[in-house]
Image: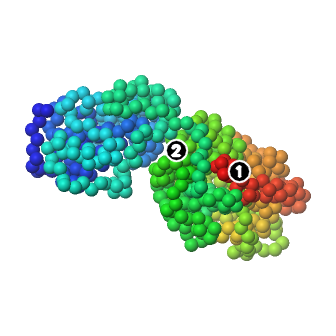
Amino acid sequence: MNLQHNNSMEPNGLSVTVASHRRSGTHLMLEYLDREFGVTARKTHEFAEETPTQPTVYMVRNPCETLWSTYRWFVEGQSSNPLIAAALKGLSFEQYLRGDGGPMTGFDDFRRNPMLESLRESRGMFYQPIRFWADHVESYLSSVDHGLIVHYEQLVADPVAQLIRVATHAQLEMPAEIRVITRDELVGHAPSKALPTPATDYWSDASLELLQREAGSVMARLGFELPQERTPHRRPTQTAVVRYVSLSDNSGIAVAGRRCVGAMIEAGIDVVWEPRAAHPNSGRVSPGRNTPSVLAERYRPGVKTDHTIMHTAPEYWVPIRHQFGPGTFTGHTVWELTRLPAAWRGSIHAADQVWVPTEWNRTTFLADNLRREVQVVPHVISVDPIAPPPMHIPDGVTVFTTIATWHPRKRPDWSVEAFARAFTKDDPVMLIIKTPPLVDASWIPEDADDVERMTWFQLMKLIKRFPDAPPVVLVNDDFTDAEINGLLARTDCYLSLSASEGWGLGLFDAATLGTPVISTGFGGHLEYLGVAHPGLVPYRSIPIGPTLNSPHLEPDMEWALPDFDAAAAMMRAVHDGTSPIITAAPALANRIRQTYSPNAVGARIASLLGH
C-alpha cells in the first residue's frame, strides 16, 4: 500500500478512517478505536476515495440485516429527517427494495437544503437500495489501497481477533487487554446480535431473488451466502413457559391483554407477564400498584422462555423481538378497518404468526399477503366484580353511556349528536361520556391551544349547537375495572357510534352484563353481536380523508358514517321500553359469556400453543 502512516496523533485527532454503508456497525468500530486505542477516527459513508490519505477500515454487514435496518431508519420514521419521511412514507419493505420511491421522488429539495448536504450523493440508498449497497461495497473491494474489510458480525462475535487486524493495518499499538463493548453501551447504536445466518423474516421470495440478481456476486466475494427463506408457517415450539407481553396502561388493548393472561392461567398454561409502557421503544416496566395480584405474581423477568406472545400494536414487535432474542414470537393484535396501514407492513413480519380477535380481522390480514399464519383468538369477558361507580346517577332517568377516547375513529361526538337529536332537556334521560381529559393527538393540530385539547371544551362546543340539549355528563376520572362494570350495569343502553371498531371492549363488556347496546353496523364487534342484532345502526362508507398526527390512518381508507337519525330513533324506542334491543339483551349476554369465557378462550390458546 502506498501510504505513509503516522502513529502520532494529528492536531485534529484523526489518524484512521472508518467507512461503511449506513447501518453497518460504524459506531461499534469507532467506539473500540476511541476506548482501546485512544484514536478519534473519521467516519464516512461516502464511496471509496481514489487516493486515501490515511488507513481506512471498511465495516461491512450482511445486506439482509443492513437493508432491513436502513429501511426501518429512513422509511418507518426513525430518522428525524422530515423530508425523507414525507418522500418515502408508506412504502413497504418490498416496495422500498424494488425502488418504488422513484429515482428522484421527493428529493428535489436536496439541492436547496443545507441540512441534507450529507445525503445529497446518497439518494441511491433510497431509490435503488440493493444496487447502491453493492456498488458501495465494490468501491472498497476494487483495490487493496482502499483499506481493511471488517465484517460487523465477526467484530461482534470475536472483537479481539478483528482489532488485531485493525491494529496491524493502521500501525496502532495493540492494547494488552481489550474490554468487550456490550449491547447496552452504545446508546442509539447498540450492536445487533451476531447471527451465523441472519433472519430473513422481512424478505419476500421476490426480494431475495432481487438481492441475488443485483448483489449476489459481491456477497459471494465477502463470503455471504444468500440465506434460505425461513418458513413463515412454522408451528410454535412447545415450551414449559410462555412469555406474554402487553401494555401496562388502561387502554382497550392493554385490558384485553391482561384478560388473555388470565385465560391462559385458567387453562393451566405456565405464563409469565411482561408489562410494557405505551411506546414501542419503552422497554420493560414494573407492575403498577393497582396491578391485580394474579398478574403481579406472573411478573418474573428473569425467566427464560422459547415462546413470546406480543399483545400490542405491530410497531412494538421489532423492539420486543430484539430484546428477547431467539425463539418463537406470536403477534396478537387488532385492526379496525379493511386494509392494513402501510406503516405496519414491515413490523408485522417480526412475528412468526399472528393472532387477531375476529374472522373479519383475519380476512383483512390475509388479504395483505403477510406470509404468516393468521389465527383467531377472541378477547375475553371481564370477570371483575361489580362495584358502584364513583358518581351520582339519579333515579328515574334513562341512562345512556359511551366509553371512548376523543378520537376521529371512536367519535364520542357522534354519540352526543345522535343523543341531542333524540331528546331535549325536558326528557328524563342522560348521556354519560367516559373519556380521558385530553383529546387524542389525531383530533386537533399540533399548534392548537391548550384549552382546545380538553375534552370538556370539545363537548361544550358541540352542545352549544343544540339550544334544548338533553343532559350530558362528562366523566374524566379514572375508574377501577369493577367500577366500570358498575357503571355499565347501571346503564340502560350502551351507545357506540364509532366510525369502526376492531373489537369494541366497552360495547363488549356492556353486552356481557346484559345491557342493551346500540352501535354502528360496521366493524369487528359484529362477530359477537351478530349481523341480525336489532341495535345495529345503518351507515354509509366514507373515505377517512386527511387526518392529523396519525401514522396509521390513510386518506383513501374507508370507514362508516352512521345514520344519526336512525340511531336517535333507536334511543327513543329504548327510552320508551318498546325496543327489540331490550328484549335481545339477555340472550346476547348468555351467548357472549359462554363463547368468550376465560375457560373457552384459554382452551383456544392452549390448542394453538400445542399444550
Q: Nearer the viewer, mark 1 or mark 2?
A: 1
Amino acid beneath label 1: Arg
Say which label, 1 or 2, has the lower sequence index.
2
Front one among 213 and 573: 213
Amino acid beneath label 2: Ala
Q: Is residue 400 visible?
A: yes
In the rendered image, the vertical position of residue 604 relative to residue 224, given as above or below:
below
Q: CA distance from mark 1 to mark 2?
A: 23 Å
- Residue plotted at (81% across, 69% down): 397
Residue 306 at x, y percent in the picture = 54, 51
Which labelled disc corresponds to residue 604? 1
Residue 211 at x, y percent in the picture = 42, 29
Which labelled disc corresponds to residue 143? none
| 106 sits to left or right of 263 | left
- Residue plotted at (37% across, 54% down): 183
Taking the view exactly as shown, the residue that stands out farthest to the right is 578
